[in-house]
């Protein structure tokens, strides 16, 4: 499928979701595994009523189960409460800077192309890439659809992750997400850890092959990340340190202030080498 047809389909799916009647959003959330299978059955009925193909639903939910590791991760994000220095140490900030400089030199053409297209320099992209997955070396081992389904069922952020689940189903439908795919604990996908809705909204074909592969293509993952930042207000040529114009776009990446500061600092150390 061409990228044009893919994004047309995405927009259509989003419109269907927004048009769902209140009765089609009635699956009951829960705070433990007891009601999960009943919730899945209700959700599948609602999704089918909204226009999602039964064959897609059957493929997507064939191996979905309640993921206790996802819930534990969602409740235990303590590193975001660390001081900046402690956070940098825990995340291996010095190593990311050192390796990131090498990555920039080794991929000069790619980063120049991305900056020309989106206005985003290499530094913050490399910072995100390094902090999220160690430059693609570890993208998670949790079953993606189980993770997203678990959080859609969980009462804490049910509406938000129900939307993520619909986006994941769209990606399954179009062949952009394998139902057996594995990733991070919240259902993040690929080398820079996009949630499904962000793949739908900002996924970009960085290597020119007509597809978006957030896992296997660093060009796609990095171009998509630049597209995300541009979509959150990135201004070409403006600064991205705290207090500067583009720091707000970085804030769109992660709500934790210490994470935002780390992206800005690591990016500056890479871009200003």
Image (cartoon, rainbow, N blue to C red):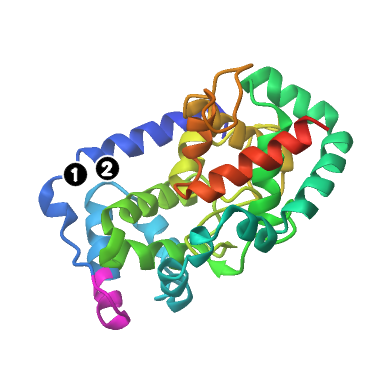
Residue on which the image places disc 1: 20
As drawn, 260 above or below 88: above
Of the 4 image quadrants, the one containing the N terminus is: top right
Judging depth in this view, the residue of 249 and 200 nearest the camera is 249
Judging depth in this view, the residue of 56 and 249 nearest the camera is 249
- Discs 1, 2 touching: Cβ within 8 Å: yes
Spot occupied by residue 73 in the image (x, y as percentages of width and height): 47, 70
As drawn, 15 above or below 157: above
Tell me what residue is drawn at x 75 percent, y 58 percent: 137
Tell me what residue is drawn at x 68 percent, y 46 percent: 129
Judging depth in this view, the residue of 243 and 233 nearest the camera is 243
Residue on which the image places disc 2: 17
SS for callout 2: helix
Judging depth in this view, the residue of 191 and 128 nearest the camera is 128
Spot occupied by residue 260 in the image (x, y as percentages of width and height): 54, 43
Q: Which quadrant of the view contains residue 246? A: top right
Spot occupied by residue 140 in the image (x, y as percentages of width and height): 62, 64
Circle 2 packing at 10 Å, graded few (<14), some (14-19), many (20+), is: some
Magenta span covers which residues? 30-39
Residue 19, magenta (yes or no): no
Q: In the image, 260: left or right of 268?
A: left
The answer to whether residue 176 is visible is no
Q: In the image, 129: left or right of 13?
A: right
Q: Label 1, label 2: how many angstroms apart (C-alpha)?
A: 5 Å
Spot occupied by residue 269 in the image (x, y as percentages of width and height): 76, 37
Tell me what residue is drawn at x 64 percent, y 45 percent: 128
């Amino acid at each position: 499928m061409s990228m044009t047809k893919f994004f047309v389909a995405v927009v259509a799916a989003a419109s269907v979701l927004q048009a769902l009647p209140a009765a089609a959003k009635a699956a009951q959330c829960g705070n433990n595994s007891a009601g999960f299978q009943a919730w899945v059955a209700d959700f599948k009925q609602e999704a089918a009523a909204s226009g999602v193909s039964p064959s897609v639903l059957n493929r997507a939910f064939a191996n979905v189960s309640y993921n206790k590791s996802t819930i534990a991760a969602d409740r235990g994000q303590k590193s975001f409460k660390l001081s900046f220095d402690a956070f940098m140490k825990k995340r291996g900030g010095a190593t990311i800077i050192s390796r990131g400089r090498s990555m920039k030199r080794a991929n000069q053409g790619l980063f120049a192309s991305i900056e020309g297209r989106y206005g985003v320099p290499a530094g913050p992209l490399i910072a995100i890439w390094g902090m999220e997955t160690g430059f693609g070396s570890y993208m998670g081992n949790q079953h993606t659809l189980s993770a997203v389904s678990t959080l859609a069922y969980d009462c804490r952020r049910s509406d938000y992750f129900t939307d993520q689940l619909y986006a994941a189903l769209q990606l399954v439908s179009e062949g952009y997400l394998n139902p057996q795919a594995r990733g991070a604990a919240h259902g993040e996908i690929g080398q820079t850890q996009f949630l499904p809705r962000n793949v739908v909204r900002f996924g970009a074909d960085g290597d020119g092959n007509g597809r978006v592969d957030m896992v296997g293509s660093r060009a796609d993952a990095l171009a998509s990340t630049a597209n995300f930042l541009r979509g959150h207000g990135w201004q070409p040529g403006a600064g991205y340190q705290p207090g500067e114009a583009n720091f707000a776009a970085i804030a769109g990446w992660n709500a934790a202030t210490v994470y935002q500061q780390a992206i800005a600092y690591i990016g500056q150390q890479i871009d200003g080498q």
